[in-house]
Structures are given as C-alpha cells and as structure tokens.
Amino acid sequence: MRLWAPCILVALSAPAASVNSYTKVSDDTQASLLALQRDDQRVAGIAWRIASRNADSCPKLWASIGVSLQHVSQYAPAYRASAQAAFGLDDSYPSILAVAEGSPASAAGLKPNDTVRAVNGVDLADKSRGQKSTASYDAVSAAMAALEALPDQSTAILSIERGGQRLDVSVTPQSVCRSRVELAPGDAINANANGLVAQISGRLVNWVESDDELALVIAHEMAHNLLDHPKKLNEKSALSGLATSLGLSGKAQRQMELDADRMGIIMAATAGYNYKIAPDFWARLNSNAPLASFLATSHPTTRARRENAQRVVDEIGSKNLNR
Ligand SMILES: [Zn+2]
C-alpha cells in the first residue's frame, strides 16, 4: 500500500493500489490511451531534465536509465483488450510506456512499446498472470524496482522484444535525483507524492499552459520526495493521533508546501526552465484549485504562496541563493 502526502490540491481519498490503472477512458479507448502515452512522454522528458541537471545538489540520488514501464495487469479488465491493441502489451512481460528525452535509454535506442523480457538476464515475467480480476500496480512496480536497482555507471543489458524480434540493448544508468514521476489519468487537477513516486494528473498536464509551468509542478512534487515530506507528515499525523494530516500538522504541512515550492523553483531554474513565472503560476494554480474547505487548513494561502515564490525568484536573480 502506498501512503500519499496530499499536495497542491489533492483529494484525501488516496489512490488505491491500482494507482496507474486506467479505469475511466472515453469511448474511443485506444485513441485515449495513445494520447495518454504522449502525455507520459512529455512528463518523462521534463522530469528527466530536472532530475539529471540537479544531480549535483540533490539530497537523494539513484541510478536511472530514464524509462517508465507499464503492464497489462495495471488496467482494469474492461480496458485490457484496448490497452493490448494500442500498445501491443504482452500477457506477462512489462513494456516501455515512455522513454525520457535525453536519457541513457533514449541514447541506447529503447523505444515506447518495447517489451522488456529481462534485465541482466533476470526474467521479468509476472508470475501471477491471469490471476488478477482487478487492476493491480504490483507487476509494473516490481519491474520498475528491478530497473531502479541497477548500479550507477555499470552497463546493463535489457533483453527486449520489438516487432517480433529479440534484441539485447546495452544501457548505462546515470545518477539523478531520486523520484519516480508518472502521469495519473484522472479528471481532477491534482498531483501528489508518496516519498518514491510523484504523480501528476492527466487533467493537470493539460491545464498548464507551457512546459515551464509543468516543470514547476513536477519539480515541486519531486521536492516533496527528496525532502521526505510524506514520511514526516505521516509521523506528525501519528504523533497527533489523527488519521489524516489535518489539525495539529496543518501548520507543518503548509510549511512543507512552501518548502517544496522553493526547492522546486530552484530545480526548475537549474534545469533551464523559465522560473520567473513561478509567483504568478503558483498563485493561479492555488486560486483555481478545487480545494474542499476542509483542506484549506493544510494549504498555504494564495498570497503566502506568491510571496514565497517571489522571494526565491529574487534570490536566484541576485545570485544570492541559499539552498
Ligand atoms: Zn505540494
């Protein structure tokens, strides 16, 4: 089970285990799935640029090749046939959902929809295939973990299948900021982080007006993970005897949001995105957020958010940055 830290605008009803499952798509399912994959590609490219260009100052690093995977079992049964038709998904092996632009995977020639059969000879078949009657993220999570366990700077061999042909591809992981970033299909404008994974909703990806804005969102969620906010928030909630992050930890959470904004703006700037839009962007997002009133105690006011962002922008501009 994943514990999610409510973030910018998040529903407290945390995603279930099937976090990456597509349970609701339009009538034209295949076209919707392919459109989501294009969004996945966009998110992966921006996340890679942020994670790689900030590696020198990140509090947590890991070795990554820059791909996200998918598996047929993450789809609700009603959508599995469409997903298999759209992506050519195998029954038991994961396949590449997105390849980050500029990553080692991209340089090695790996492509979306490649089936990944083995990593360094370790077979990635899902042993529970055919058992699951509901969408489950277990198989894709296990496959991602196998990739994320690869040592830095040591060449790995991915055994893939593409168009009926088997290929062994050599790829060398690179040390980058530690956070998985993924797109979560959904109609709500939200994003969240659980310490390992940052999720950006499909609606939010389409709500932002530029890659610069999306970079601020992605970097903010990465910052939550890099600063261990989900864990700290859970500890606070446990201490105060509350099942949620409301009440006594509200003040702590408001500070975490401002801290994640700060670190996120710095990371976006380091990655070469236009960070100067941050005060207006966070104010616009904050005031458009369909926040339930009960969440208001856990989130900064729009004014506090704008002022905090402006301070960071000014510091970066004056090169007087205190990381
Ligand atoms: Zn946040």
Image: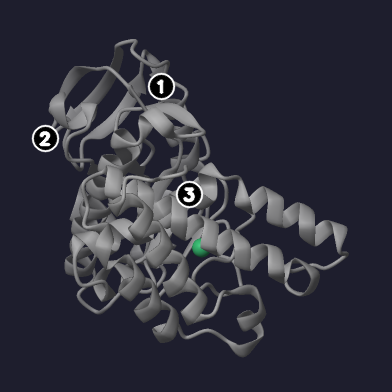
In this image, 76 relative to 193: left or right?
left
CB atoms of marks 3 and 1 within 8 Å: no
Which SS class for mark 2?
A: loop
Amino acid type assigned to the residue bearing label 1 in the image: Asp
Please tell me the numbered disc located at residue 223.
3
Q: Work out whether residue 209 can be spotted.
A: yes
Q: Nearer the viewer, mark 3 or mark 1?
A: 3
User: Label 1 belongs to which residue?
Assistant: 123
Please tell me the numbered disc located at residue 163.
2
Amino acid type assigned to the residue bearing label 2 in the image: Gly
Q: Nearer the viewer, mark 2 or mark 3?
A: 3
Which of marks 1 and 2 precedes in the sequence? 1
Residue 174: image location, x then y, percent: 32, 23
Residue 296: image location, x then y, percent: 61, 82
Report the Cα–Cα distance between label 3 and label 1.
Answer: 33 Å
Please tell me the numbered disc located at residue 271.
none
Residue 195: image location, x then y, percent: 57, 46
CB atoms of marks 2 and 3 within 8 Å: no
Which of marks 3 and 2 precedes in the sequence? 2
Report the Cα–Cα distance between label 2 and label 3.
Answer: 39 Å
Which SS class for mark 1?
A: strand
Residue 146: image location, x then y, percent: 45, 27
Q: Answer above or below: position of 92 versus 42.
A: above
Which of marks 1 and 3 precedes in the sequence? 1
